[in-house]
Image: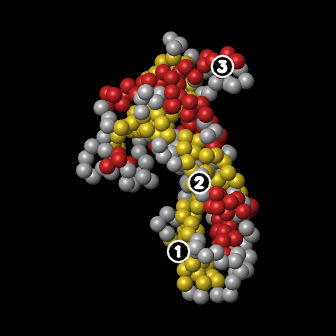
Amino acid sequence: MSSSVYVRPFHREDRDQLTALVNAHAAAVVPGAVASVNTVLSSMERHPDEYVTDPWVAERVTLVAQERQRVVAAAHLLRYRNAPDVGEDYRDAGLVEWFLHVPADPADPEGAEGEAPGSTAAEVLMSACLAQFSRWHVRTRGVDGRLPVPGVYGVPDVWPHVRAVIERAGFVHTGDVEVVLLAPVDALPAPGPAPLPGLTVRRVLGPLGTRLVARLDGADVAYVELDTQLDRPERLARSGGTADVADLDLPDEPLAGLTEWLFGEARRWLALAGVDRLLAYADDDEPAERALLASLGFQELTLTARGWTHRPR
């Protein structure tokens, strides 16, 4: 291990370098994704959107690894309370909410041996994370890759350098694999006339966003719910807008043209909202769902592995 690597708690003067590290990882998952410095700092203090699990957090620690005055690796750790009001799986649990580092250049033989900036530092930083868990005496240890950027969570397959470090540290993937997809809004089906007599759309507020409900002869038959508040100005620095499919419900027996028409209505609404990109998510083991989204104009960005548990050898 290089003696030039220094692991320490995050200092406010690290904010610009840390944000650059966060944005480099985020942009590898979602093209053009970028968070503001304020967004990154705020996410290290609390997650108000996670109104169920965030109050369960007892402690938060951010560690950085510095090499030659450069922040080359960073991790954000959470310790959950051990109390009756905390969900059973979270009680007395430790979580590396995200772990990031500058990867070695695979085209550089010397870097491939681990001498590139960030490679040795990542190993040192991971050791510090495990040491912090030991000081906390947590019951379980987990890893995620949730950044304060829409669509970035789990351990995406475009971060092989991160996955290699956490696997060497004894973390095992025990959860699901999800597909993250993105569609330019103008690639969605064009708005058009209803494909069936008596088919109308009704817009209401749903639990997760704006819900567009397809109604056939006065009965609800399908809906798509859109979260258009992902790109609030105080959170993201990217121009334009990104939304996601927060929920989608379609009839078991397909109705000709219904799904395309419903997404055409979604396109109409998103354009009025100034949104130019739409995220969606699917299970890796649901090929029909993935094929449907592809037919609607979505492109697959990454496979992301959720749920990592520490099982030291």
User: Which one is closest to the eye, mark 2 or mark 3?
Assistant: 2
**Image position of 192 with respect to 23: above or below:** below
Place of residue 241 in the rendered image (x, y in percent of width and height, measured from the top left) = 64, 55
Quadrant in the picture for the C terminus: top left
Label 1 sits on residue: 204
**N-term-proximal mark, 2 vs 3:** 3
Q: Nearer the viewer, residue 166 or 101?
A: 166
How much space separates mark 2 and mark 3, taking CA atoms? 36 Å
Q: For the residue marked with disc 2, what is the amino acid? A: Asp
Q: What element carries label 1?
A: strand
**N-term-proximal mark, 1 vs 2:** 1
User: Which one is closest to the eye, mark 1 or mark 2?
Assistant: 2
Query: Mark 2 near mark 3, Cβ–Cβ under 8 Å?
Result: no
**Image position of 280 with respect to 199: above or below:** above
Label 2 sits on residue: 285
Label 3 sits on residue: 111
Label 1: how many Cα within 10 Å (few below 14, some 14–19, many 20+)? few
How much space separates mark 1 and mark 2, taking CA atoms? 31 Å
**N-term-proximal mark, 3 vs 1:** 3
- Residue found 64% across the figure and 53% down from its top: 181
Q: In this view, does 31 lie to the left or right of 209?
A: right
